[in-house]
Amino acid sequence: MAGFFEGRQLVIASMHQKEQVLQPLLEASLKVKVAVADGLNTDLLGTFSGEIARIADPLTTARKKCELAMQRTGCDLAIASEGSFGPHPSAFFLPANEEWLLLVDKKHRLEIHARHLSTATNFAGQAFSSLEELESFTSKVGFPSHGLILRRSKDSTEGILKGITDPEQLRTAAKNILEKQGAGYVETDMRAMFNPSRMRVIEETAILLLKKLNTTCPNCQLPGFAVTAVEPGRPCSLCGTPSSAALAHLLVCSHCQHQEKVLFPLGKKTEDPQYCQVCNP
């Protein structure tokens, strides 16, 4: 889609410095002029640290960010990301970072998004009752390159300290908590500017989005014709039993909803018997 967005102003709806990774990719790939919505307070839509609960789902929240940024700047092209953290949906013992990145183009009435789930995160938190316990935690989560949050307790937001990247500040604040109440709670700060690991996941999500933006719908000729579902069932080459491997991809246009089903999308018509539940149970 060379030229589709070229020369237009694109606003990033972020107050957490996500432009560090988004701006170079967007300007190079889309040939747009990137700006940041100065003064936009996206924390009003929810904070990781719990002062304000996120009410809507991630995609709706990202859409609201885009709307606010466009209202604030007068741009008709905006992009926003929204992240979530918790146990991986299938590997429950691993923490995961789910990122959504949404581009809204009011001029063409177009919305295109990408979702990325990654285990490359330091998301963690624990109670501590000594400086030794605190230091043990910090050594596991990439401090001080990754910021931390200190609380009086896990669910308390009173007197919360965020964005800690200075070891001396951390030690002083922790000693103060321990002297007052004997225990505290420490967790990773998941805001992008304090979390290089998350910033990399946002960058990876942007690359996925740009791949979508570089696919054109054969029906309406607009960008965003991408895989939305995978149909399993590629047959085993030995016994013919349908496997869990991809038999087909379903591509759907995010604008006109045109659909196409592509059989054997990876160029393989059969699956290796080692991945067959019958041949290799």
Image: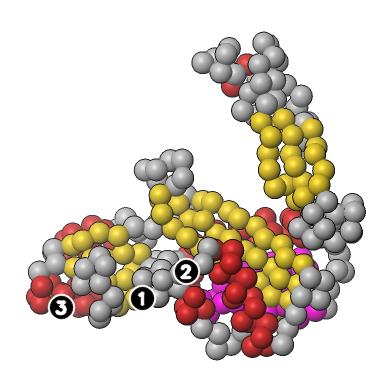
Q: Position of residue 8 (x, y in %)?
A: 80, 79
Q: Which kind of residue does numbered mark 1 sit on? A: Glu
Do the residues bearing badges 2 and 3 touch, measured as CB atoms within 8 Å?
A: no
Q: Earlier in the sequence, mark 2 or mark 3?
A: 2
Read off the residue under disc 3: 176
The total number of labels drawn is: 3
Q: Earlier in the sequence, mark 1 or mark 3?
A: 1
Read off the residue under disc 1: 51
Question: Measuring 79% from the left and 70% from the top, which residue is drawn there?
Answer: 109
In the figure, residue 51 lies in which quadrant?
bottom left
In the figure, residue 274 lies in which quadrant?
top right
Q: What span is in magenta?
A: 8-31
**In this view of the protein, can residue 271 be seen by the observer?**
no
Question: Measuring 21% from the left and 68% from the top, which residue is drawn there?
Answer: 153
Q: Position of residue 188 (x, y in %)?
A: 35, 64
Q: Left or right: 60 with respect to 175?
A: right
Question: Measuring 66% from the left and 16% from the top, which residue is drawn there?
Answer: 241
Q: Which kind of residue does numbered mark 3 sit on? A: Asn
Could you give the CA–CA distance between mark 2 and mark 3, rounded to whole angstroms? 34 Å
Read off the residue under disc 2: 55
Other residues around mark 1 within 10 Å, as few (<14) / some (14–19) / many (≥20):
some
| Nearer-the-camera pick, 191 or 84 | 84
